[in-house]
Image (cartoon, rainbow, N blue to C red):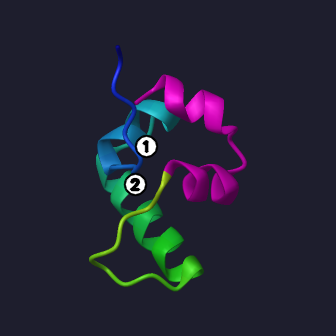
Amino acid sequence: MKIIRACIYPKDIQRITGRSERYGRKLLNDIKTYLGKDQHQFITVEEFADYTGITKEIVKEYL
């Protein structure tokens, strides 16, 4: 059984978008700012999908 994670990391964003890991860190910080989250809080698959417009199913394929 494949374990599905609930949160997104910069390396995941790199794999999904083909951009650099640094871009992934910046995007996560932008999403946290947009959602009003603190730096220690995580971004979920649903929040990432809603922000980027990529479907949850596509995101979960890369986790």
Image depth: mark 2 or mark 1 in front: 1
Magenta residues, as a range?
A: 45-63
Nearer to me, 36 or 26: 36
Q: Is residue 41 left or right of residue 48?
A: left
Quarter of the figure with residue 25:
bottom left
Residue at (63% x, 38% y) in the render: 56
Q: Is residue 58 magenta?
A: yes
In which quadrant will I find the C terminus?
top left
Task: Report which residue position mark 1 lands on.
Answer: 13
Q: Splitting the image into 4 quarters, where does residue 22 fall?
A: bottom left
Q: Is the Cβ of the residue at disc 2 closer than 8 Å to that at disc 1?
A: yes
Q: Is residue 1 above or below residue 58?
A: above
Q: Which residue is mark 2?
A: 23
Mark 1 is surrounded, within 10 Å at the Cα level, by few (under 14), some (14 to 19) or many (20 or more) other residues, namely many
What residue type is disc 1 on?
A: Ile
Across and down, in percent, residue 60 comes to 51, 31
| Horizontal relation, residue 10 to residue 61: left or right | left
Task: Determine the secondary structure under disc 1.
Answer: helix
